[in-house]
Image (cartoon, rainbow, N blue to C red):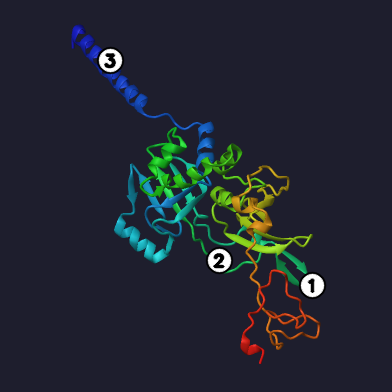
C-alpha cells in the first residue's frame, strides 16, 4: 500500500472513531442524571408513611407486583391466581400505607401495610428468667408469624434517576391512587396553618381532635380505654410496632392530652403541653342548661282521691284542700234553684 492510500485509511478510521465517540457522548447526555444522596433522603421523606388507595388487588407476601415502563407484572390472570392462593393484602379501593422503602440498584421497593416480614422479631427472642420459668418480653401469637402486607417494586433502567416524590407517585398511578386524598386536603385547608403542616407531615400535636389524628396517621391499629391516676377516663390509640417507632396518643374526651413516642433508639419522648388551640365546636360552646334536654314531669301514682288530704297535709295531685279559700280571680260556682231544696 502506497503512502497516500495509507494516510486516507488512517484518516477514515480516525473519523469513524470520532463519530462513534460523539454518538456515545450524545446518548449519555440524553440520559437523566442519577439520584443524589440529598434527593434520595427527600424521596424517602416524601413517600414513606404516605397513604394511598389500591387500584388493583395486591397479594400478601414477598411476590407482590413489579412496575417497569408503566407495565405491571405478573399479568392480570396470573396476579388473580396469586391473590387467591396467598390471600389479598388489599382489595380494590382499600386504603394502604407505605411503611418502608428500600432503594437499591435500579429499583425502589415499597413495603405496604407492614410488608412481607415473617417470623419472630429480635425482641421476641428475649425472655426473663424467674420463678423457675422463662417469661418472654413480647409474647407471640398466631398473628406474629403471619405477614399481611404486600410489596410493589418500581424498576428503572440501569440506575435510579433523579426523580421527585410527585414523579414517583405518577409512576405508581396504575397501582396506587394518591389523588384520592383530596378530601383530607380539603379538610386540612380549613384548619390553622400549624395543624395543616402537622397533618401533611403525619405528626400529632397535643390539642388535636380525633378527626385530625386520623387524617395525620390514619385509623389506629390498636386502641383501649382506661383511667389515669386522677380517676379520669381516657382513650389511647397506638400506632406502630416495635422495634419500629411506636406512638401512644391519649385522648381526654375528644382532645389529645398526651403524646408518648417510643423512638427506635429507645428514647422515650412525652408531650403533655398543649401545642395547638382549637375553636370550640358549636355544641361545646352552648351553656349546659341550653344543651340539656328538657325534663318531662311525671305524675306519681297515688291512692288519695282528688280533693282528699294526704298524711303529709298536702292535697292529692289535681285536687285541693276542702277548706281551701278560693282566690279572688276564681269564678264562683253557679247557683241553681234546685240546690235550695
Task: Identify residue for label 2.
Answer: 143
Q: Position of residue 330 (x, y in %)?
A: 68, 72
Q: Residue at x 29, y 59 (%)?
A: 77
Q: Residue at x 59, y 68 (%)?
A: 141
- Camera-near label (3 vs 2) is 2
Please report contact status of discs 3 and 2: CB closer than 8 Å, yes or no. Answer: no
Q: Callout 3: 10 Å neighbours few (<14), some, many (20+)?
A: few
- Return the disc, 2 or 1, that comes first in the chain's sequence: 1
Q: Residue at x 61, y 59 (%)?
A: 121
The disc label shown at residue 131, or none: 1
Q: Position of residue 149 (x, y in %)?
A: 48, 57
- Return the disc, 3 or 2, that comes first in the chain's sequence: 3
C-alpha distance separating marks 1 and 3: 86 Å
| Residue 247 in view of the camera | no
For residue 66, side relative to residue 256 (left or right): left
- Camera-near label (2 vs 1) is 2
Q: Position of residue 314 (x, y in %)?
A: 77, 80
For residue 332, side relative to residue 113 (left or right): right
- Return the disc, 1 or 3, that comes first in the chain's sequence: 3
The disc label shown at residue 14, or none: 3
Amino acid at each position: 500500500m502506497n503512502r497516500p492510500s495509507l494516510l486516507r485509511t488512517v484518516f477514515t478510521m480516525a473519523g469513524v472513531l470520532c463519530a462513534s465517540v460523539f454518538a456515545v457522548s450524545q446518548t449519555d447526555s440524553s440520559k437523566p442524571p442519577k439520584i443524589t444522596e440529598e434527593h434520595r433522603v427527600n424521596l424517602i421523606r416524601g413517600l414513606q408513611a404516605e397513604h394511598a388507595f389500591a387500584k388493583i388487588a395486591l397479594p400478601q407476601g414477598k411476590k407482590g407486583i413489579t412496575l417497569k415502563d408503566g407495565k405491571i407484572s405478573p399479568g392480570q390472570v396470573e396476579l388473580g391466581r396469586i391473590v387467591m392462593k396467598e390471600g389479598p393484602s388489599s382489595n380494590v379501593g382499600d386504603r394502604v400505607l407505605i411503611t418502608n422503602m428500600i432503594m437499591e440498584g435500579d429499583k425502589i421497593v415499597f413495603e405496604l401495610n407492614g410488608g412481607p416480614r415473617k417470623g419472630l422479631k429480635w425482641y421476641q427472642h428475649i425472655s426473663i428468667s424467674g420463678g423457675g420459668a422463662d417469661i418472654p418480653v413480647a409474647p407471640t401469637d398466631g398473628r406474629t408469624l403471619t405477614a399481611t402486607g404486600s410489596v410493589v417494586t418500581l424498576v428503572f433502567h440501569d440506575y435510579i434517576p433523579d426523580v421527585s416524590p410527585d414523579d414517583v407517585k405518577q409512576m405508581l398511578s396504575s397501582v396506587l391512587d394518591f389523588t384520592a386524598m383530596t378530601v383530607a386536603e380539603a379538610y386540612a385547608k380549613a384548619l390553622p396553618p400549624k395543624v395543616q403542616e402537622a397533618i401533611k407531615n403525619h405528626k400529632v400535636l397535643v390539642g388535636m381532635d380525633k378527626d385530625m389524628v386520623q387524617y395525620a396517621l390514619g385509623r389506629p391499629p390498636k386502641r383501649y380505654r382506661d383511667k389515669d391516676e386522677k380517676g379520669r377516663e381516657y382513650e389511647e390509640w397506638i400506632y406502630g410496632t416495635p422495634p419500629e417507632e411506636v406512638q401512644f396518643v391519649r385522648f381526654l374526651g375528644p382532645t389529645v392530652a398526651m403524646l408518648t413516642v417510643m423512638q427506635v433508639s429507645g428514647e422515650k419522648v412525652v408531650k403533655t403541653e398543649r401545642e395547638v388551640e382549637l375553636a370550640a365546636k358549636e355544641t361545646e360552646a352552648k351553656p349546659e342548661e341550653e344543651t340539656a334536654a328538657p325534663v318531662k314531669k311525671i305524675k306519681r301514682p297515688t291512692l288519695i282521691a282528688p280533693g282528699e288530704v294526704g298524711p303529709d297535709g298536702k292535697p292529692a295531685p289535681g285536687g285541693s284542700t276542702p277548706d281551701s279559700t278560693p282566690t279572688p280571680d276564681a269564678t264562683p260556682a253557679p247557683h241553681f234553684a234546685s240546690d235550695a231544696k
